[in-house]
């Protein structure tokens, strides 16, 4: 109980402090301290060093342990770079967006922690809605017209989506009519235990509503529009949080629902929906890459692709499911690198247009090389994490009932790799027409330090997977009944 | 009694479909809020307790007073035109809504044979969700979209009552707070959007040739 309270109250205190003190240094120090303590506690829970009790509507299992550590880790690194980020100038004249930056970041971590640790469907819903509320004003950080429209779109689409998810939750309550769960609270654990008693029609309807509703937040096609716009216009640290953690929090709701469906006759139906959503997401990424002109949007679509492959892996089941869990871990680290580099390039060139960005390697050597490495990481080149997780997903797909899906996926992946590579190499290597006017004395800073650290951590985790991680992921697969 | 109130709620939906004034949209929101509050209080009348009144009272404050007031304030501040423009002809909109509601009522009646729930509130709630989405899809103006979203939210509240699933009070209050905060943020966004985009030079020129 103490641990969970600490994880919720510490950021709250930091948020209040950030609101009261106008000095950025104080706000940064307090937020960084709370992020560090949050990371320590979630790491202690993850490794089993500390075992907290369940209380009220909060509890945890192997799935939430993994998601919590992914959230904490990404958040800590993002907070670390935030001070340097807010010192950078913004596009518009107004700097009022910076005022509430740290306060909103703290609310973000509270809402996400509450969503991940909730053991009750309605509590999860309230917390998931709160994550949207905390992150939407951060999208409007630069106070530009584009970011305003992106914020509006995100807020509106996701609010409607999450309202749909609530209908799904009520359907779940309906499915329990006439069983022992009738009139009981909607605890995940109780529903999973008594899944076979639930009415299949309402269960299926509930899954459809929850999946479609949360898709707006996960960024699964065809509901990805608001999410992509928000990710591509948000400040780069926030965009990295979007990709690595917010989408995962939303995915948790779908996974809980799947866990219930697993022991019923409706499981095949859910698998079909997930596989279709995953394939569609990869397809829309491919279509976008063919005509991409906007660098940040390209990076945002890369998230749609990777969430697509995660959903695909979960839908395929078996080994692919285990691969998808590893993919979630590596995705959070890779995306931080990709977005932070893209953000630096955006600031330097004052443009997101790929045709206006050239000679990055000469003008920004540190960022350029890290951007290139991030591209390799995101494309699944060894020894980066995606290689290992994708191999598992592909192997799982090969030995599933529909191996031809593997062929389609790999073909689309290849085309995305070629097109994305083409755009990356254009930005990095093309001769810079203004070369003589600009200096290329880029200094090593905290952004580069963060990207390099995360890349190294990722390679270490991928090559020599710690026992505690592999055991935790096996436990998740066991909870989901994915192991033979 | 529950059925009578639900039918009144349905009528308010029809009014939303036929009217074209933003003011009456806001009045309908108020009326729906009152209906929801009465629906929530009904089960408490036999065994009255002060504690049971917390949620309906909060609902009354949020849905009947705060949100409609806020909408009116935005309308006045921005000098929004009273008339609502639609991308669909008025008659077709009515036809589509009537057809959808008829389908919803028939399907709900069919479904109630296998699962026990109150048919009329259930179908009304689903109709409100559908009409809310139609308003978002077929009506222009951002403020009207927000009202469409609120109608959808009202539908979901009603749905919760029809399914008779009781959540702990903290969750109900949390979800009310969430809805209010969403509307508040949307209001700020509308304010900013209209002050940055609609005062754009190009638009000003177009208005004043």
Image: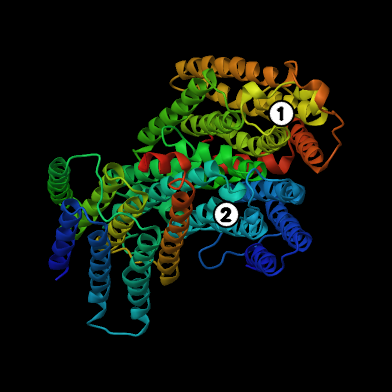
What secondary structure is found at the residue carrying circle 1? helix
Percent from the top left, x then y, of residue A380?
66, 23
Compared across the picture, whether A45 is left or right of A402 comes to right
Q: Which residue is mark 2?
A: A112
Q: Nearer the viewer, residue A225 or A190?
A: A225
Q: Nearer the viewer, residue A22 or A64?
A: A22
Compared across the picture, whether B76 is left or right of A404 comes to left
Residue A481 appearing in the image: no
Q: Which residue is mark 1?
A: A374
Numbered circle sitting on residue A75 = none
Q: Does A251 appear above or below A135?
A: above
**Quarter placement of the N terminus of chain B:** bottom left
**Chain letter, disc 2 residue:** A
**Quarter placement of the C terminus of chain B:** top left
Q: Does A50 appear above or below A214?
A: below
Residue drawn at (66%, 59%), measured in percent from left and top? Answer: A99
Q: Does A423 appear above or below A91?
A: above
- Foreground mark, 1 or 2, reads 1
Percent from the top left, x then y, of residue B176?
40, 65
Of the numbered discs 1 and 2, the one sitting upstream in the chain is 2
Percent from the top left, x then y, of residue A378?
66, 27
Percent from the top left, x then y, of residue A90?
67, 45
**Chain letter, disc 1 residue:** A
What secondary structure is found at the residue carrying circle 2? helix
Q: Nearer the viewer, residue B25 or A453?
A: B25
């Amino acid at each position: 109980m103490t641990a969970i309270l600490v994880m919720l109250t510490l950021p709250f205190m930091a948020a209040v402090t950030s609101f009261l003190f106008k000095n950025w240094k104080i706000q940064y120090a307090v937020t960084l301290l709370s992020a560090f303590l949050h990371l320590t506690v979630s790491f202690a829970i993850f490794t089993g060093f500390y075992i907290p009790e369940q209380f009220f509507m909060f509890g945890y299992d192997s799935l939430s342990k993994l998601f919590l550590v992914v959230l904490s880790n990404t958040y800590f690194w993002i907070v670390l770079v935030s001070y340097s980020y807010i010192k950078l100038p913004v596009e518009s004249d107004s700097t009022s967006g910076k005022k509430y930056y740290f306060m909103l970041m703290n609310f973000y971590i509270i809402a996400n922690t509450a969503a991940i640790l909730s053991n009750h469907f309605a509590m999860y819903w309230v917390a998931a809605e709160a994550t949207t509320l905390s992150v939407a004003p951060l999208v409007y950080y630069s106070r530009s017209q584009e970011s305003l429209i992106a914020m509006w779109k995100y807020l509106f689409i996701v609010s409607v989506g999450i309202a749909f998810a609530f209908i799904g939750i009520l359907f779940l309550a309906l499915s329990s009519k006439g069983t022992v769960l009738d009139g009981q609270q909607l605890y995940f654990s109780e529903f999973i235990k008594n899944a076979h008693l639930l009415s299949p029609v309402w269960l299926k309807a509930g899954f459809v509503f929850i999946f479609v509703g949360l898709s707006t937040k996960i960024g699964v096609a065809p509901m990805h529009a608001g999410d992509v716009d928000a990710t591509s216009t948000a400040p780069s640290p926030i965009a990295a949080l979007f990709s690595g953690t917010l989408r995962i929090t939303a995915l948790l709701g779908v996974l809980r629902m799947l866990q219930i469906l697993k022991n019923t006759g409706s499981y095949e139906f859910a698998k079909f929906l997930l596989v279709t959503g995953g394939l569609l997401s990869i397809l829309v990424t491919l279509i976008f890459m063919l005509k991409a002109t906007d660098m940040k949007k390209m990076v945002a679509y890369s998230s749609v692709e990777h969430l697509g492959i995660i959903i695909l892996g979960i839908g395929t089941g078996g080994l692919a499911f285990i691969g998808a869990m590893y993919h979630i871990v590596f995705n959070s680290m890779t995306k931080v690198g990709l977005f932070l580099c893209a953000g630096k390039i955006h600031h330097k060139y004052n443009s997101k247009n790929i045709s206006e960005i050239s000679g990055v390697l000469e003008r920004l050597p540190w960022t350029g090389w890290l951007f290139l490495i991030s591209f390799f990481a995101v494309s699944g080149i060894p020894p980066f994490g995606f290689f290992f997780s994708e191999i598992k997903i592909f192997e799982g797909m090969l030995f599933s009932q529909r191996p031809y899906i593997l062929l389609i996926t790999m073909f689309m992946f290849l085309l995305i790799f070629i097109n994305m590579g083409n755009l990356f190499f254009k930005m990095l290597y093309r001769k810079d027409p203004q070369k003589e006017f600009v200096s290329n004395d880029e200094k090593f800073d905290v952004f580069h330090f963060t990207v390099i650290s995360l890349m190294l951590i990722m390679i270490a985790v991928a090559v020599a997977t710690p026992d505690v991680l592999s055991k935790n992921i096996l436990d998740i697969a066991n909870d989901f009944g994915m192991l033979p | 009694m529950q059925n009578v109130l639900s039918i009144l709620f349905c009528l308010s939906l029809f009014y939303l479909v036929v009217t074209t004034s933003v003011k009456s949209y806001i009045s309908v929101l108020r009326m729906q809020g009152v209906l929801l509050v009465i629906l929530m209080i009904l089960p408490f009348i036999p065994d009255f307790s002060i504690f049971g009144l917390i949620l309906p009272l909060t609902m009354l404050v949020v849905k009947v007073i705060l949100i409609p007031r806020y909408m009116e304030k935005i309308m006045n501040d921005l000098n929004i035109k009273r008339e609502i423009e639609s991308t669909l002809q008025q008659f077709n909109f009515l036809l589509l809504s009537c057809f959808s509601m008829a389908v919803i009522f028939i399907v709900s009646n069919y479904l109630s044979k296998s699962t026990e729930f109150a048919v009329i509130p259930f179908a009304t709630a689903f109709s409100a969700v559908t009409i809310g989405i139609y308003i978002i899809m077929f009506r222009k103006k951002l403020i009207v979209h927000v009202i469409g979203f609120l109608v959808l939210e009202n539908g979901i509240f009603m749905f919760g009552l029809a399914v008779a699933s009781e959540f702990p009070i903290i969750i109900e209050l949390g979800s009310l707070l969430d809805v209010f905060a969403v509307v508040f943020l949307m209001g700020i966004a509308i304010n900013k959007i209209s002050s940055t985009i609609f005062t754009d030079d190009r638009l000003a020129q177009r208005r004043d040739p």
